[in-house]
């Protein structure tokens, strides 16, 4: 029967691990803003600052440096969603050996390009790590290569464990818990083995995405569980089946597990940026998202937590999605579908009500409306909030004042799609003129606009989304009878907001005009 390595065995392997030929001792920095907000000290272990922007080079190199000259002569192969691939490619370059990297087709281009730049031979196959892994085992046999596992190997685990060694050396004071993202389990296995051997009172808390929680399901079931599908937002942790060794270690040594969702991770990416001016990838922010969730559920104060920022290989284009969802994830933005009477003045009354909501003035973050019914109008509204749970109170307040409201803050369909689809043709939008305005981003700008408008000019379309700049861009449709065009043009000139008329724009005619 195979003898399992114990924490004492792993402690020795970690202490003698060869990682610093390629890795640096990353800094352990206080997250001052986040700590102040959470009333607990949060420390960030900056593995995002490694040469390949991820911790993975530690374990990969520690494995490869112990291979025989014969093995190195033939080359190595691995399967990876990206970060382990870069670690293997860098290690192979350092050791002068060939590296074949099998990556899922869903891997961000930034990681593919980085592997190629390091001299790795990239093979794209399958939708997840598990699919890529199956293909890599076939190539391993065909070409006589040595497989470098991304997580289920004692030497890889030991390399990752050097992170915990550094954390305990860098922080001398009390440490209540270390939060660690889990994909296949290599990182948390190394961290847990070292911490439980040296300072067993420190909690080790594993974190997974709620749609990629193979380790948590496996520990709960008492055996490894294969997921049918995994979410790909956090591609660095998108693993369908965890390792045998990592499962055994996690089951025995990890104190607690937490799942986080996409919005929470987006908010955590923003939190890390606020404190460090660095952008981590989704898997790199899992630990921070979990600390916030842990503090909220346990009501802790004055404790010290460490979060391992395990990667920063983020595709720039994904930042649009992250920025969109971060405010909702932090519950600093609430979304609503509000029904208002389709009558003169109701639009203005609703805007005035927003300014009088309990909790002080709130900025409108989004406002989408298209006339569609003669009796009532449905508007999609986003508002700033200052505390969790406020959206329900705001919805109740709208309803109390005669504006039936549906809280969409936690509705995935609304957040991903419906907010971008409010609009369309309307037979009621006669005599419509379409204008793009630039508004100053300050409370009251919208109300000023409405107060200057003649009662006879009905708003038939409105679209606005806060983009985080000093000025907001707003699209407005107004029903102006031809006899009022001269007066309307004068109104636009005296309004004081820059504008462009789009009534003759062919895109408007195709998608919005009757």
Image: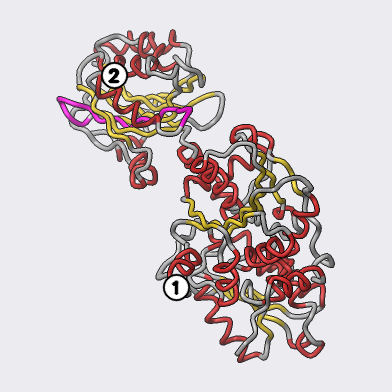
- Which numbered marker is on residue 347? 2
The quadrant holding residue 366 is top left
Q: Identify which residue, 96 or 329, lies in the foreground.
A: 329
Which residue position holds label 1?
225
Q: Identify which residue, 491 or 358, lies in the foreground.
A: 358
Q: Sort mark 1 into few (<14), some (14-19) or many (20+) by Cα contacts within 10 Å.
A: some
Which residue is rendered at x = 73% and y = 69% of the image?
Answer: 159
Q: Give residue 359's position: percent from left, percent from top.
A: 43, 19
Which residue is rendered at x = 44% and y = 29% of the image?
Answer: 365
Q: Give residue 205's position: percent from left, percent from top.
A: 58, 56
Q: Between tags 2 and 1, which lies in front?
A: 1
Callout 2–callout 1 Cβ contact below 8 Å: no
Q: Give residue 126's position: percent from left, percent from top.
A: 49, 73
Colour mode of the rendering: secondary structure
Please give the range of residues in magenta. Answer: 372-387
Q: Identify which residue, 373 or 221, lies in the foreground.
A: 221
- In terms of sequence position, does the residue under pointer 2 or pointer 1 come before the other? 1
């Amino acid at each position: 029967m195979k003898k399992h390595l114990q924490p004492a065995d792993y402690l020795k392997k970690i202490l003698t691990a060869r990682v610093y030929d390629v890795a640096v001792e990353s800094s352990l920095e206080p997250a001052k803003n986040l700590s102040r907000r959470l009333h607990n000290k949060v420390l960030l272990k900056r593995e995002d600052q490694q040469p390949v922007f991820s911790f993975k080079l530690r374990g990969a190199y520690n494995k490869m440096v112990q291979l025989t000259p014969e093995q190195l002569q033939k080359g190595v192969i691995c399967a990876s969603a990206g970060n382990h691939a870069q670690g293997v490619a860098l290690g192979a370059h350092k050791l002068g050996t060939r590296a074949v990297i099998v990556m899922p087709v869903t891997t961000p281009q930034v990681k593919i390009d980085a592997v190629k730049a390091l001299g790795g031979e990239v093979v794209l196959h399958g939708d997840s790590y598990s699919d890529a892994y199956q293909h890599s085992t076939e190539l391993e046999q065909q070409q006589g290569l040595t497989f470098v596992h991304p997580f289920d190997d004692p030497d890889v685990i030991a390399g990752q464990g050097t992170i915990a060694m550094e954390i305990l050396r860098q922080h001398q004071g009390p440490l209540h818990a270390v939060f660690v993202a889990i994909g296949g389990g290599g990182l948390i296995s190394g961290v847990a083995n070292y911490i439980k051997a040296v300072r067993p009172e420190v909690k080790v808390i594993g974190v997974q995405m709620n749609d990629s929680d193979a380790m948590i399901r496996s520990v709960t079931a008492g055996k490894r569980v294969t997921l049918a599908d995994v979410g790909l937002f956090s591609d660095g942790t998108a693993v369908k089946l965890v390792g045998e060794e990592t499962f055994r270690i996690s089951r025995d040594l990890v104190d607690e597990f937490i799942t986080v969702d996409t919005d929470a991770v987006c908010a955590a990416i923003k939190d890390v940026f606020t404190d460090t001016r660095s952008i981590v990838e989704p898997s790199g922010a899992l630990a921070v998202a979990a600390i916030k969730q842990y503090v909220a559920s346990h009501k802790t104060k004055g404790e010290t937590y460490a979060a391992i920022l395990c990667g920063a290989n983020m595709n720039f284009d994904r930042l649009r999605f992250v920025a969109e969802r971060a405010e909702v994830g932090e519950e600093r933005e609430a979304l609503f579908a509000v029904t208002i009477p389709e009558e003169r003045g109701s639009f203005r009354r609703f805007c005035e009500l927003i300014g009088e909501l309990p909790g002080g003035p709130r900025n409108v973050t989004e406002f989408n409306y298209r006339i569609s019914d003669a009796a009532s109008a449905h508007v999609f509204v986003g508002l700033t909030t200052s505390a969790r749970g406020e959206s329900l109170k705001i919805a109740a307040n709208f309803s109390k004042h005669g504006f039936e409201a549906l809280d969409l803050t936690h509705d995935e369909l609304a957040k991903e799609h419906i907010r971008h689809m409010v609009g369309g043709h309307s037979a009621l939008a006669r005599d419509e003129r379409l204008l793009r305005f630039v508004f100053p981003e300050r409370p009251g700008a919208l109300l000023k606009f409405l107060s200057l408008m003649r009662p006879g000019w009905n708003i038939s379309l409105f679209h606005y989304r806060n983009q985080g700049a000093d000025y907001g861009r707003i699209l407005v449709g107004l029903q102006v009878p031809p006899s009022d065009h001269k007066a309307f043009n004068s109104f636009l000139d005296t309004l004081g907001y820059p504008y462009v008329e789009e009534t003759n724009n062919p895109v408007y005619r195709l998608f919005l005009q009757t």
